Amino acid sequence: MIRIVDASEKYGEGQQMIVAAEPIAAGEKIWWCPCSDDGFILSRDEILHLIELQPHLRNFLCWYSHMTEDDTYVIPRTFATQQHDDDECVLFNHSCEPNCGFDSDYGQTIVAMRSISIGEELTYDYSFLETESSLIRGLVCECNTPSCVGTLMFDRYRDEEFQKRFYLYMSPYLQRRVRELKTKWYSTKCFTRSATDEKRKSLHALEWIQAGEIVARFSGPIDIDNHFIAKASKSEATCMVDAHKQVISLYDLPPQSEITLNYHGKL
Ligand SMILES: C[S@@+](CC[C@H](N)C(=O)[O-])C[C@H]1O[C@@H](n2cnc3c(N)ncnc32)[C@H](O)[C@@H]1O
């Protein structure tokens, strides 16, 4: 059903792509990705540490990892040899007007979203899998479609039009993130980190946050068990909550700073 061909001209030296080897009908299942079952599961910090130790693995780790949860990345088991063997699902490229997506019942199955002709490139939108802390955030898109967004920031899941069109084609992780936006909203400048000693998740700045910016917003009770914002003493908290249940930064917060609140004081 599919063929792998050279794509150096479109995406750059050494790049490959998947094309349809026969006509594919809308809704047809194209590929079942084994990587989520077989791959190594690492946090963002663990991957960045690995890249620091072995810089030659950077492209492999960043290109072929995908997110299955906040701060949870699956990388092909073969990363040490830099081969992707039969995991051809890693060769699907991104398009801002994709023709494939994920089957919402079986998140690991790639299906055709419309009929596809022989020779047409098979693509999905990487925003069906990735959020702002994607390891390829900032990739300049070469999909050449009229609705190309340019630089991929992986915040498209927040857009209501995008949700309406593509919710059913997003991975289970992205679908959950879309649902959570209604009750537990975090700024695009934040990311969740799970690599603390107690394995409790915590919220951090992904990029520079200025004093007075809205960092998060809640609709329910602001309870420490309800979200990932850690507690701190009054003098150490980096944020406060305003009358509209918005978490506001008290200071300029450089990347990596932890978002913290003083839960004992009046929130
Ligand atoms: C999962 S791999 C896809 C397969 C890749 N083409 C290969 O041959 O290994 C993701 C990488 O492919 C390239 N890529 C995929 N879609 C792209 C796009 N729309 N624009 C530019 N580069 C893209 C980027 O280098 C990206 O990091």
Image: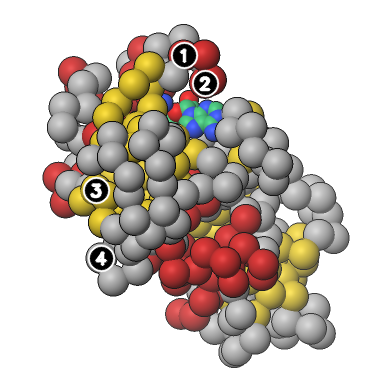
Q: Is mark 2 within 8 Å of ligand 1?
A: yes
Element assignment for label 1: helix
Q: Which mark is residue 31?
A: 3
Which of the two discs, 3 and 2, labels the residue nearer the N terminus?
2
* Real-space CA distance between mark 3 and mark 1, rounded to the nearest whole angstrom: 23 Å
Q: Quadrant of the N terminus?
A: top left
Which of the two discs, 4 and 3, labels the residue nearer the N terminus?
3
Residue at image mark 1: 8
Above or below: residue 186 compared with residue 154? below
Residue at image mark 2: 11
Residue at image mark 4: 106
- The amino acid type found where label 2 is placed reads Tyr
- The amino acid type found where label 3 is placed reads Trp
Residue 172 rendering spot, x and y as whole percentages = 37, 66
Q: Residue at x 46, y 49 (%)?
A: 99
Q: Is mark 1 within 8 Å of ligand 1?
A: no
Q: Is residue 113 left or right of residue 165?
A: left
Element assignment for label 2: helix
Q: Residues within 10 Å of mark 3 (few under 14, many from 20)?
A: some
Residue 35 rendering spot, x and y as whole percentages = 21, 44
Tags 4 and 1 touching, CB below 8 Å:
no
Q: Residue at x 62, y 56 (%)?
A: 156
Q: Is mark 3 within 8 Å of ligand 1?
A: no
Q: Is mark 4 within 8 Å of ligand 1?
A: no
Q: Which mark is residue 134?
A: none
Q: Residues within 10 Å of mark 1 (few under 14, many from 20)?
A: few
